Amino acid sequence: RRAASMSAARAATTVVAVHLNARAARPCSAHGVARSTRGVTAARGQVYHRHARGSRALRPRTSAADGADASAESFDVSDAPAPARAARNVNAFTRTKEKDPYKRLGIDADSTSEEVSSAFNFLIREHAGDERGVEAIEAAYDRIISDRLSTRKKAKGLRKLRKEKKENDADYDPAILQRVKNMFAKPDQQTLIRRSVLYAIISGWAIAAPATSGPAFQMAVAFGTCVFFLNQKRGGEKTLGTAFRDSFIALLCGWLVGSIVPVYIPLFPQAMSPELILALFSFASLWVTCTFLK
């Protein structure tokens, strides 16, 4: 009976081995082949033992060498620790030695701020885990930002300097013009109105006078009035000579302008005589002198 039991056990083992070999012959993955090989090894080590109750049971018995082979065959990369898997998947940054920060980030020097930020974020995600590469990327980004801020501050300072220079140039006047400005001053409104009315009356008197007599008398009155006002404005002490000189210069300027302008610009009717036109320009020049000259 014992011999018969052993024969049956060997037959069963042979059937299982044939079945597993047939499955192993099918195309499958490397993991499946490893499993089939372990199955064959386990089947060969099975031994049927009779229990005390008289029942038959299948008890696998595997040697230590078979267990070591099975554990070695069943090792897979997915069973490795997480740091090892991360080390295998790191994408190293290869432009760490590039000195130009724009070339290190892979952009042009005229790129906008949005393009610089996009390139920085992309490289940080792409090379996460490479500490040296991430430091090089951050250093290039910081240098670009600092350079652009410095350039912006310099441009702002230059614009401010240009604006100040323009304002200074606008306020600047040549020395001769400043000297002329210092010679004149605006009087109060009452004085301005009174003298304007006075010289308007003198001008109307000259126009209404007969053409045969001419405006000589009116010219003398206007000249004497100018000398009086200048002398009064300057205090009346030893200023009569300068007042007479300035009034005479004003009279000459009026005559000069009156003899040139009407020739090229016909401002007056033809009925007016040249003497009357010269007198009107002289009245205007004397009014400006006695009213605005210091």
Image (spheres, helix red, strand yellow):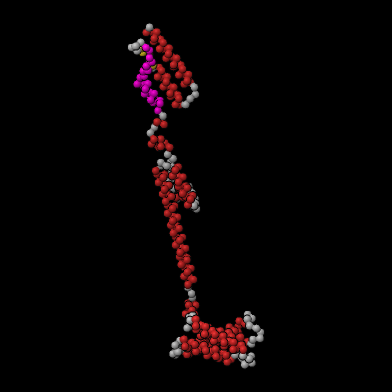
Q: Nearer the viewer, residue 231 or 196?
A: 196
**Residue 10 appears in which quarter of the rendering?**
top left
The residue positioned 59% from the left and 89% from the top of the image is 205
Is 201 left or right of 239, judged from the image as shown?
right
Image height check: is 187 above or below 167? Answer: below
Q: Position of residue 7 (x, y in %)?
A: 40, 10
The residue positioned 49% from the left and 87% from the top of the image is 229
Q: Position of residue 182 (x, y in %)?
A: 47, 80
Task: Residue at the far left: name it.
Answer: 52
Q: Position of residue 110 (x, y in %)?
A: 50, 53
Image height check: is 163 above or below 266? Answer: above
Q: Nearer the viewer, residue 39 or 217?
A: 217
The residue positioned 44% from the left and 53% from the top of the image is 145
Magenta residue span:
55-75
Q: Position of residue 89 (x, y in %)?
A: 43, 37
Image height check: is 33 above or below 137? Answer: above
Q: Nearer the viewer, residue 249 or 279?
A: 279
